[in-house]
Image (spheres, coloured by chain):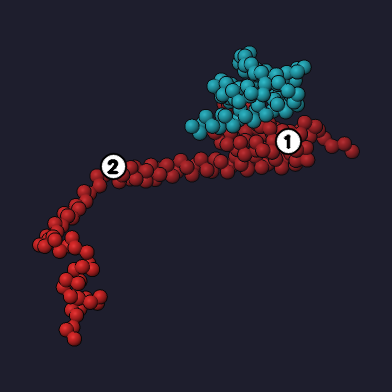
Amino acid sequence: MAKKEVLSVDNLEVHRGKDSVIISVNPKIYPLDTIFSAGYIFIDKAYVIVDGDPNEEIIVQLKAKDKKTDLEGLGREFNNELINYSFYAAQTAKNMPIRTSIMQRAFFTQAQKEPEIEFAKPVELKVENIEEIAQPWKSRRQKVGKNKSGRKKSKS
Amino acid sequence: MERIKVEGRKVKVEVNPAFYSHYCVQKTKERFKKICQVSVIKKDDMLIVTLKPNSKVNLEILGYEFYNHLLSTAKEIRSG
């Protein structure tokens, strides 16, 4: 017995001969942004065509790139992605005030003036006998009569 | 819903402007300019895109690819 060419299940219409599935979507439930986002996921596996009436009924056609693809599964996966994206959109809208306040706080903190840092004044060195500093260590030791450890040489 | 029609060495893609704006079509057209000759006309509230490839390719697939690029551009425009 030959397989039916067109199979209608729920909001899906499977066209086996054309390797495509047509999904009808209610725009009052799923906005256009959600439909585009869900469709974008399928770009790798299928060719996506969005058509219909944006106020009454949106038609999404998925034509599988691979002929072995389970078309009904593809359509059902699209339905799942619609739910996924509408949930994401709802969560984003819900978190919007919190996110805005966090951003405002971050910008406010950044806008505040940074406290001025006081640097210590440079210390002035007082040198009494500058000629002694100019002399190399070796000659100074010989003059004073100190050994390497810094002690004065004993007379013996 | 036949939106892609192969006519000789050309493929005609019908685009619904309610979903894909004229700007979106023009932006996608720029992408396809490198590989084919593209023309866009308005007919009966629909945009008709004619693609004539420079080299030998599967015309039906070219039409479908144009639709996928349209979707990508539309999403890009909407997300800002």
- Height in image: A136 above or below A67? below
Q: What amino acid is found at the position of numbered circle 2 in the picture?
A: Ala
Residue tagged 2:
A111
Please say if A55 is above or below B50: below
Secondary-structure class at tag 2: helix
Q: In the displayed structure, does residue B18 sit left or right of residue A111?
A: right
Query: Residue A126: x percent and y percent?
Result: 11, 60
Q: Which residue is mark 1?
A: A65
Which residue is found at the position 34% from the left and 45% from the top?
A: A106
Check the image and name the residue furthest to the front: A156
Color used for chain B? cyan
In percent of width and height, residue B29 lies at 61, 22
Chain name for mark 1 = A
Location of residue A129 by image quarter: bottom left
Name the residue: 46% across, 40% down: A93
Answer yes or no: is residue B23 visible. yes
Q: Please tell me if label 2 and label 1 are on a single chain.
A: yes
Query: Residue B79's x, y, as percent?
Result: 50, 33
How crowded is the residue under tag 2: few (<14 C-alpha within 10 Å), some, or many (20+)? Answer: few
Colour assigned to chain A in the rendering is red
Q: Name the quarter where the C terminus of chain A is drawn.
A: bottom left
Q: Residue furthest left?
A: A128
Q: Which of the two discs, 2 and 1, labels the residue nearer the N terminus?
A: 1
Q: Is residue A137 left or right of residue B5?
A: left
Q: Secondary structure at mark 1?
A: loop
**Is residue A151 found left or right of B50 in the rendered image?**
left
Q: Look at label 1 and name its amino acid.
A: Lys
Q: Which mark is residue B32?
A: none
